[in-house]
Image: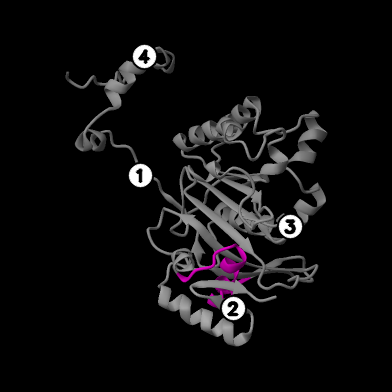
Amino acid sequence: MPVRQPDLTATPEELKKTTMLDAIRMAARDTSGIESLGLPPRNPILGDWFKEGDCGFIFAPRGLGKTWLSLAIATAVANGRQLGPWQAHGIWPVCYVDGEMAVDGMLERMHGMEAGPNLSILNHEALFHLSAKVLNIAEPETQQALMDYCLETGQRVLILDNLSCLAAGMAENKADHWEAVLNWLLAMRRHKVAVLIVHHAGRNGEMRGTSKREDAAFWVLRLDPVDEEKTGTEKQTRFISRFTKERNSGKPQTPLEWIFETGPDGLTRICHKVADKMVIFRKWLEAGLNTASDIAVEMETTKGTVSKMAKVAQKAGWLATDGRKYTLVS
């Protein structure tokens, strides 16, 4: 059967009347047929890991720096700046949805990072003050409203901070509850609106809730403390970032150590450096991995390199071995 060609003169109302069978007949093509559609490729937004239409996650324990890094990404993308080793590719309108912070705290951080007019802030307190409404992305009304707002105002990046506060009533451990949000995220992807979701780590150090939410993500960025002690001060925040999933660049992403420090002038200064591999090695041990082969996969290195790090840790007195298994020494 010949491929049915789309009617390029059809109105949106007429297209809605197209049957699913007709739609499949038009869309099912060989590679040359797909190429002939002229669908534009997804453009990079930040570095080589964040692109148009992405769904990505940043997760960490409470108070470690999730919002700091998310705001830094938002301001870099909205202003075409560089963040650490990651350069923004042009200027992208960003909507930052804040479901937790007080307005004064959010404004203080935004001013400190010189947010600029290209970054829209949808704060939960401001929304309630103006309309007595509450955001809940688990509900279709909020999903549709956020999509409509992004499309009518040209927002290209939507940041949701954080999932626990913005998805009331959604059981985190039930995969079918996530489906209602996933369908909306996939619709945002089709409109090439990238969505960054901020979430909490569970007691096991992994992202809290069902693992199914990671299936459709292009990348997942995990934050860890720099050491076992409480790091940072009232004016300084320190953490290590590392990707647990990243499928845009096709190459390993280097774990980074970050310092966010607010100066006397109220401005936030951001420093970064490549994270100490021994620190990353220990973090994987703390996450429950106990063999050289498993850790090598996560660190994207060789088993021999992991074994050498284990010998260093043994000499330092904080690692023991039992055959091929490693055990942290208290």
| Disc 3: CA contacts within 10 A as few (<14), some (14-19) or many (>=20) | some
Q: Earlier in the sequence, mark 1 or mark 4?
A: 4
Q: Is there any visible trace of residue 277 in the rendered image?
A: yes
The answer to whether the residue labelled 3 contacts the one labelled 2, judged by CB atoms less than 8 Å apart, is no
- The stretch drawn in magenta includes residue 186: no
Left or right, residue 302 beside residue 312: left
Q: CA distance from mark 4 to mark 2?
A: 64 Å
| Disc 4: CA contacts within 10 A as few (<14), some (14-19) or many (>=20) | few
| Secondary structure of residue under mark 2 | strand
Which residue position is annotated with label 1?
A: 41
Q: Position of residue 181 (x, y in %)?
A: 58, 33
The answer to whether the residue labelled 2 contacts the one labelled 1, judged by CB atoms less than 8 Å apart, is no
Viewer-proximal residue among 161 and 289:
289
- The stretch drawn in magenta includes residue 285: yes
The structure residue drawn at horizontal position 36% and vertical position 14%, both measured from the top left corner, is 19
Which residue position is annotated with label 3?
A: 109
Q: Earlier in the sequence, mark 3 or mark 2?
A: 3
Mark 2 or mark 1, which is nearer to you? 2
| Secondary structure of residue under mark 4 | loop
Q: Which residues are magenta?
A: 271-292
Q: CA distance from mark 3 to mark 2?
A: 43 Å
Q: Amino acid at mark 2?
A: Ala
Viewer-proximal residue among 197 and 318:
318
Mark 3 or mark 2, which is nearer to you? 2
Q: Which mark is residue 19?
A: 4
Q: CA distance from mark 3 to mark 1?
A: 34 Å
